[in-house]
Image (spheres, rainbow, N blue to C red):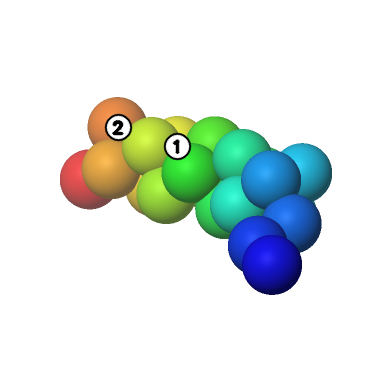
């Protein structure tokens, strides 16, 4: 199963890098 905590953390970092660029 997928760990939603890690997945959510990944999305958070992904959005952060997206906003930075």
Residue 7 shows in the view:
yes
Q: Is residue 21 left or right of residue 5?
A: left
Residue sitting at x 38%, y 37% = 15
Q: Secondary structure at mark 2?
A: helix
The label on residue 16 is 1
The C terminus is located in which quarter? top left
Graded by Cα atoms within 10 Å as few (under 14), some (14 to 19) or many (20 or more), the crowding at tag 1 reads few
Graded by Cα atoms within 10 Å as few (under 14), some (14 to 19) or many (20 or more), the crowding at tag 2 reads few
**Image coordinates for residue 1, horizontal then vertical, percent:** 69, 67
16 shown above or below 10:
above
Q: Is residue 19 left or right of residue 12?
A: left
Contact flag, marks 2 and 1 (Cβ < 8 Å): yes
Residue at numbered disc 2: 19
Disc 2 from disc 1: Cα separation: 5 Å
Residue sitting at x 61%, y 52% = 7
Quadrant of res 16: top left
């Amino acid at each position: 199963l997928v760990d939603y905590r890690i997945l959510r953390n990944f999305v958070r970092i992904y959005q952060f890098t997206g906003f930075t660029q």
